Image (cartoon, rainbow, N blue to C red):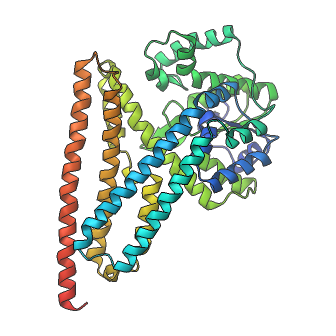
Amino acid sequence: MKKQFQSHIPDTEDSVSKVWEDAIIVFDANTLLNLYRYSDKSRSEFVALLQNLKDRIWTPEQAAHEYFKNRATVIADQSKAYDAAKKSINDLRDALRKDRAHPFIADETMGDLTSVLEQVETELDQNKEIQASRIPSDEIMADIVEIFDGRVGEAFSADELEAIYEDGETRYGQKIPPGYKDIIKHKDPQTAPEKRSVYGDLIVWKQIIAKAKKDTRPVIFVTDDTKEDWWHEAHGKTIGPRIELLDEFHVGADQKFYMYRPDQFLKHAKDRLQSTVSSETIDEIRATDIVRSNESIAKNALRTFENWKSLDPERQNKIMHRVRDIDYDQMSKSQNLLLKFTKEAHRDIKLSNWTKIDNLQSKLRKTILQKLGINRNIEHLEEYLESGVLADNEKEASEVFQRRDSLASEVTRLNMEIETLKTEIHHLEIERLREGD
């Protein structure tokens, strides 16, 4: 039974330790592209770890191809993220200014918050300039090129790629992982770039298996891909790699295959390889992955509207369920930074000893952030509509308009809730003053 169903049976601690001692450590394109999304400190620690593991790391040629193809786009997207963060700061500042008629924040605390907001804005402006300068002169790319020099796999030939595309069409039709979720990128890929985009994950997978077989070594694969065509999920929790992947890897390479998200990999590297990556860096990278995962859910759902009618009801329900489950509190790292500050500042507010007001203030902050997150989703929908993709599809465009209007109605409801919470807090504060508390 152990041999027949080894992919279902967890490895012993000795086996896990041996894999971590011997494995080739493989990085996908998005893990490398994420270096543009991290703070200087976190990126520096991650790059230092790559340097220390230089003799063991490797990336498939397809992953390197995707890195260079998407590098400039990621840099540009980060510039947009800085603009969105500044907008969030301005929204928060405006909300607090309106609240000055409700004295639930001490003047000293308000002054401290204003000072922090100005510092954050200055830092955002500086970092935006640094990001923009990376398109022509990129020190991050220089690090990656140096570290992975001689550690990139060979490209498949044109004939090998055509065979993978043909195999991929069959696999995707039967939902055999990995990569079948990418079919929404191009419904009917015809050109070589379209096919390489749709079947990119499968190319990566085939190149990893070939590498493990050639070197007769296990593989640790680090990826920030969260789609179900890589991960085995049960009751909303990620269990590990898909069983089909483990079986195929065992048959194709006769080796162990482990897969981790970037933050999980760093945590294991810290524990098992005595790396010096800080807990703060691991926390930041985990937060970044959550943000990217939620934004990916929203964008993929929007793309799916293009062929919505062709999906079965179960798939439609699953998409809408995932959109509803987006954690709006995690949609922006800058929002979390501000939330963290206001929570710390809140300890200095005289009202902190009154539990009911504390709870209302906490609910108010959460509601404001939820509204900001929904506004961001509305912006995504409007961008999608303005793109012209649905110009010839009136019915599906109407569905997107309805979704946008529904979210706008939710924003209106949240605005009313915000005003109600402010009024309740104001009244409770008056009562507290009357009681001489």
The residue lying at 70 percent from left, 16 percent from top is: 156
The residue lying at 36 percent from left, 30 percent from top is: 302
When the figure is inspected, residue 120 is found, relative to residue 104, above or below; the finding is above
Residue 328 locus on image (x, y percent): 37, 50
When the figure is inspected, residue 211 is found, relative to residue 11, above or below; the finding is above
Q: Considering depth in this image, is 65 or 142 the residue closer to the camera?
A: 142
Q: Is residue 363 visible?
A: no
Query: Where, by quadrant of the figure, is residue 323 drawn?
Result: top left
Taking the image as shown, residue 369 lies to the left or right of residue 172, namely left
Residue 385 locus on image (x, y percent): 31, 28
Q: Considering depth in this image, is 178 or 101 the residue closer to the camera?
A: 101
Locate the C terminus and report the quarter of the image it occupies: bottom left
Q: Considering depth in this image, is 103 or 315 the residue closer to the camera?
A: 103
The residue lying at 32 percent from left, 28 percent from top is: 386
Residue 435 locus on image (x, y percent): 19, 90
Query: Where, by quadrant of the figure, is residue 417 drawn?
Result: bottom left
When the figure is inspected, residue 193 is found, relative to residue 208, above or below; the finding is above
Q: Considering depth in this image, is 170 or 354 the residue closer to the camera?
A: 354
The residue lying at 47 percent from left, 61 percent from top is: 337
